[in-house]
Image: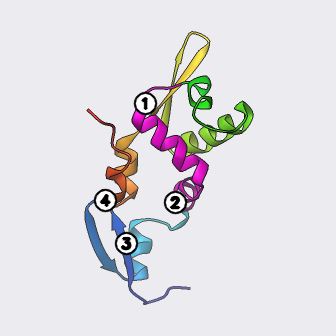
Amino acid sequence: MLFSVPIVLIFGSSRSVMSAPTLQRNAKLTDFESPFKALADQKRLEVLKLLTKHGASCVCDLMEYMDMPQSKLSYHLKILLRAGFIQKESRGTWSYYTVREERLRELLSEEVAESFRIAQ
């Protein structure tokens, strides 16, 4: 069933109003469910902020700043990884995680994505 109610979308730096049929042609709403669910958790937002601040970090580094066991932290990292917000690089027996700024900019307004920008 299609609705003709306008839907306001804010992606990247552009804001647009489009009808549901137009929205359906451009992207399925279900494509956005997983990424936005990944961001809808305070702990995962904290992880993103830490990775933004400290750069490439392993779970043991992040555990110093987060009050949670390694298993829970790994769970949150896995969700962020699947949503494409972070990437993992293996170095020997360690895995290091970094923020994928371009992915955040794809889905979020510039104002929100800017809060996760890695300091130069």
Q: Quadrant of residue 9?
A: bottom left
- Labels 1 and 2: the sequence-earlier one: 2
Q: Is residue 85 visible?
A: no
Looking at the rendered structure, the secondary structure element under dot 3 is strand
Q: Horizontal and vertical percent for residue 119? A: 30, 36
Circle nearer the viewer, 1 or 2: 1
Q: Is residue 94 left or right of residue 56?
A: right
Q: Quadrant of the C terminus?
A: top left
Mark nearer the N terminus (2 vs 3)? 3
Q: Nearer the viewer, mark 4 or mark 3?
A: 4
Q: Which residue is mark 3?
A: 9
Marks 1 and 4, the one that precedes in the sequence: 1
Q: Which residue is mark 4?
A: 111
Residue occupying the point 57% across, 47% down: 44
Indicate yes or no whether the magenta region holds residue 68: no
Q: Residues within 10 Å of mark 1 (few under 14, many from 20)?
A: some
110 or 81: nearer the eye?
A: 110
Q: Nearer the viewer, residue 111 or 29?
A: 111
Q: CA distance from mark 4 to mark 3?
A: 14 Å
Mark 1 vs mark 4: give the one in front.
1
Q: Amino acid at mark 2?
A: Asp
Q: Which residues are magenta?
A: 32-57
Which residue lies under the disc numbered 2? 31
Q: Amino acid at mark 3?
A: Leu
Mark 1, residue position: 54
C-alpha gap between disc 1 and disc 2: 30 Å
Amino acid type at mark 4: Glu
The amino acid pointed to by label 1 is His
Q: CA distance from mark 1 to mark 3?
A: 31 Å
Element under disc 2: helix
Question: Where is 91 relative to 69, above or below?
Answer: above
